[in-house]
Amino acid sequence: MEATVLESWVLAEFPTPDALVVATRQMREKGFEGMDTYSPYPLHGGSEALGLPPSRVPFIALCGGLTGVATALAMQTWMNTIDYPLNIGGRPLLSLPAWVPITFELGVLFAAFGIFFGLLGLSRLPQPYHPVFESEEFRTASTHGYWLSVPQATGTDAAPVMDQLKALGATQVTFVTGEKE
Amino acid sequence: MSPPVTNSHTGFEPYNGTPTLMVPAFAVGVLGLLATLGGFFATGAKGETAHAYLIGFTYWVGISVAFLIMQAIFHTAKAKWLIVLRRTMETASAVIPVFFVLALPLLAMAAYLYPWWPGSELTKGYSGLELEHLSHKQHGYLNNHLPIGIGVRHIIYFGLWTFAAWRLRTWSLKQDTVGGLDFTVKQRKFSPGVLPFLALTITFASFDWLMSLTPLWQSTIFGVYYFAGSFLAAFCILTIVTVNAQGKDLYGSVVKLDHFHNLGKLMLAFTAFWAYIAFSQFMLVWIANIPEEAPWYGLRIFGAWRPLSIALFFLHFLLPFFILLSRNLKLQPRKLAVVAVYLLVIHAVDLYWLVWPALTGDAGPTFHWSLLTAFFGVGGIAVGTALLLARGQYTLTVKDPYIAESLRYVQP
C-alpha cells in the first residue's frame, strides 16, 4: 500500500470574515473539497459555507451522559443494598428518589467528558506538529486574519488555485507542504 | 449602523384581520363559563365544578402573568433577538385585568375549595387539634373568620400586574408612532424594578389559589413550581402563535428560523426547569418525612394517584425533554408547534394533579365534564380578549430602535 508522505495546502488570507465566507462558498461551488476556515473567533456562517456534515459530538455526549446515569444507578444500588446496607429512618434500602442528585451529577459529568474528549479526538488534538506551523504569515489566524485552506495534490501546480483565490479577494496566498502525521 | 425601519420599510400596517378567530373564542368562552357556573349553582356537583374552575382559572392567569415576567426579564437583559416577538407577549399580558373579573366566581366557590374559608363544610375533614394548629399558625394570613387578607392580596396582585403589563404595553404602542429610544429606555428602567415584586406576587398568588387547598401543608418552593409550569406554557403559546401568524400584517412571516430555534431551546430549558423544581420540592418533603408535610405527597405517590404521578414524570419531563433535545426538530416550526400543543395539554394535567386530589382524596383521579367547560371557558375569554387587544395595532414593534437587529438575528 502506498502511503501519502507529503501533503500540501494552498492558504489564502481574506480581509474580512464576510469575504472569507463568500470565498469559501464560491470555492466549494467550484468543486473544491476538504477545505477549512481559520479565524481568531467563531465564524458566522463558516460551517454552512464549508458544507460540513452534522457534528458527531452530540451523539458522543448522549452516550457519555447515559453511561454516567447507568454508572451512578448501578453504583448506588450496589453500595446501598449489597455492600453496606444501612437502615435510615425506616426508608427502603432501594430509595430511588435519594439517588437522583448523584445520578444527575454523574450524567452531566460523563456527558461533559464525552464532549471534551470527543471533540479532542475528532479534531485530532493535541497535534504537536503540522506543516502549516512553518508558515509565518498564517500566525495572523489567531490574532486578526481570516484564512482559508485548500488541499492541493502534492507535486501539482498550485498557481491556478492561487489565482482563483486572489480573484475572490484574497489579500495574500501562500503554499505549504510537508509531513502531516 | 442599521438603517431606520419605517412602515414603508417593513410594509406592515396595523393588524385588522377579520375576527375569524376572536368571535369563536369569545363564543366558546361564554358558553364554557355559563356551563361551568350553571353547573356550580344549579347542580349538586359544587365541589367538582369549583375545583374545575380553579384549574381553568390558574392555568390561563398563570400564562398571562408569565408573559409579563418574560417581558420584564428580556427588558432587564436588554435582549434584542426577541423584539419581533414582543408585541405578542405584551398583548397576552394585557389580558390580566380580565382575570380579576374571572377571579370573582372563586368568591362564591371558595367555601367548596378551601377548608379555611369561613363556614366551609370542608372543615369537618379536620380534627380539633388540626384546626387549632391551623388557626394558631395561619390565622393572620388566611383569616378563617373573615377573609379580608385574601381580598386585599388579590387587589395587590391584580393591581400590580395590570399596572406593569399596561405600562409596558402603552409605552410600546406609543413607540409605534413616534419611534426613538425614549420608550425603550423607560421599559428597560421599569422592568428590573418591577421584577422582584412580580416574583413575590406570583408566589403568594399560588399559595392563595393552590397551596391553601390543603392549608396544613406548606412548601416555600411551591410558587416557583407554579411559575415554572406557567412559564413553559407561555413559551409554548408564543411558539404556536408565531407559527400561525402568517399572512398580511402578521409578524410570523418575518420571523427567522433562528427565532424558532431559540423558542425551542427555551422550551427545552423550561421543561428541565420544571422537572428540577418539581423534583426538588418532592425530594425535600420525601427525605424529611415530617408528618405535617408528607401527607400531601403521600396521597399522590401511594394509592390511586400513583400512576398519574409517575406518568407526569415521564410525560411532563422525560418525553418532551428527549424530543426537544433534537436540533432538527427545533428547526422545523410546524413540528415544534405540535410539541408546544402537547406541553400545553400536559401542563393542564399538571394543574389537575395539583388541585384534584384535594377534592377526591384517596378515591383517585376522576373526570367531570366541568373540567373541559371551565378550561375552555376561561381560555376562550382570555384568547378572545388577547385577539381583541391585538386588533388595530401592529403585530410587531415596528419602530423599536432594535427591530432591524432582531429581524436580522443570527444565532451565535
Image (tube, coloured by chain):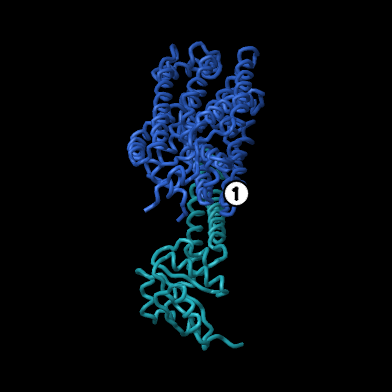
Q: Colour of chain A?
A: cyan
Eyeballing the image, is A15 above or below B99?
A: below
Question: Which chain corresponds to the colour blue?
Answer: B
Residue drawn at 62 percent across, 43 percent down: B338
Residue drawn at 43 percent across, 17 percent down: B151
Q: For the residue labelled by badge 1, is the local secondary structure a helix, a strand or a loop?
A: helix
Q: What x and y, as percent, mark residue A42?
A: 43, 63
Eyeballing the image, is A155 above or below A51?
A: below
In depth, the one of B235 and B321 nearer the eye is: B235
Name the amino acid type tagged 1.
Ile
- Circle 1 chain: B
Q: Quadrant of residue A131?
A: bottom left
Q: How many marks?
A: 1
Q: What x and y, as percent, mark residue B239?
A: 55, 42
* Quadrant that contains the C terminus of chain B: bottom left
Eyeballing the image, is A143 above or below B242?
A: below
Mark yes or no: residue A100 visible: no
Q: What x and y, as percent, mark residue B8?
A: 46, 44
Residue furthest to the front: B8
Q: Quadrant of residue B165?
A: top left
Eyeballing the image, is B34 above or below B269?
A: above
Q: What x and y, as percent, mark residue B206?
A: 47, 28
Q: Is residue B199 left or right of residue B329?
A: left
Q: Crowding near pointer 1: few (<14 within 10 Å), some, many (20+)?
A: some
In depth, the one of B248 and B105 nearer the eye is: B248
In depth, the one of B17 and B286 nearer the eye is: B17
Residue pointed to by mark 1: B323
Mark yes or no: residue B29 visible: yes
